[in-house]
Amino acid sequence: MAVDKTRRSKDLEDLMVAGVFSRDMLDWKTKTPEGRTAEPDRAPAPSRDAVPEQTPLFRTDFSDDTIWEALMDAVDRVTEDNFGARVNFVNDPALRDAPIDSLPAAAPFPVDEGAHFFVFDGVACAGEGLPVLVVSTDPDDEPPSFRASAESVPIVEGDLGSGDVPFTECAARVGDDGVLR
């Protein structure tokens, strides 16, 4: 799949302006033991301290890159009420079909107990509205997870991230089809 380099450059520029990345962090050249500059095979993962605390959205289904891109576009949009999801897309092929309980350890920053995270799995990939799984890390939350359409992720993340709406209350909003829309 071709990457739109103009869009990616603009995205990186926006992240630098927002203070998420610095130009130094984007310089992926490393020094070899001999002191020569070398390009690594891939960009190093940002340190846990370098990424602001955003809600991780883990990709565990890698069957369709186009659908993943559509999900990211839907989640990145700003709603009419000026809500924007503060998510960190975790797109690591090592997480293919990973168990849900193993995902918080793969986040680029600690996921605290009582927090939440999103999962793009096979159900989300195949479902109408790309219904991602919303998972609570609080063992007392019942139910411990629910589905939310990609378009509703900014609202769900805003409600849960601000603490204005408890997880169980948010989960109670799911429709008859089991998805919060």
Image: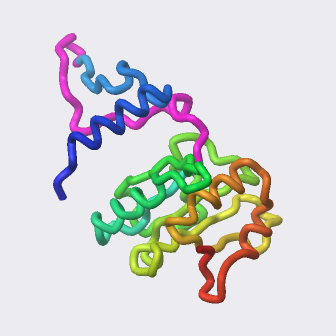
Question: What main secondary structure does the magenta stretch of the protein show?
Answer: loop
Q: Quadrant of residue 179?
A: bottom right
Of residues 162 and 118, the one drawn nearer to the viewer in this rendering: 162
* Quadrant location, the N terminus: bottom left
- Relative to 124, is 169 on the left or the right? right
User: Which residue, as the protein is rendered here, is positioned at the far top?
Assistant: 35
Q: Is residue 69 above or below residue 83?
A: below
Q: Quadrant of residue 70?
A: bottom left
Q: Is residue 43 magenta?
A: yes
- Relative to 54, is 162 on the left or the right? right
Q: Where's residue 169, x and y in %?
A: 79, 68
The scheme the figure's colours follow is rainbow
Q: How many marks?
A: 0
Give the magenta-colored segment's residue range: 32-54
- Residue ID at (36%, 19%): 24
Q: Where's residue 60, x and y in %?
A: 43, 65
- Residue ID at (54%, 57%): 103
Q: Where's residue 136, x and y in %?
A: 69, 62
Of residues 123 and 10, the one drawn nearer to the viewer in this rendering: 10
User: Which residue, as the protein is rendered here, is positioned at the far bottom?
Assistant: 176
- Residue ID at (44%, 26%): 17
- Residue ID at (45%, 80%): 128
Of residues 84 and 93, the one drawn nearer to the viewer in this rendering: 84
Q: Quadrant of residue 2?
A: bottom left
Q: Is residue 75 magenta?
A: no
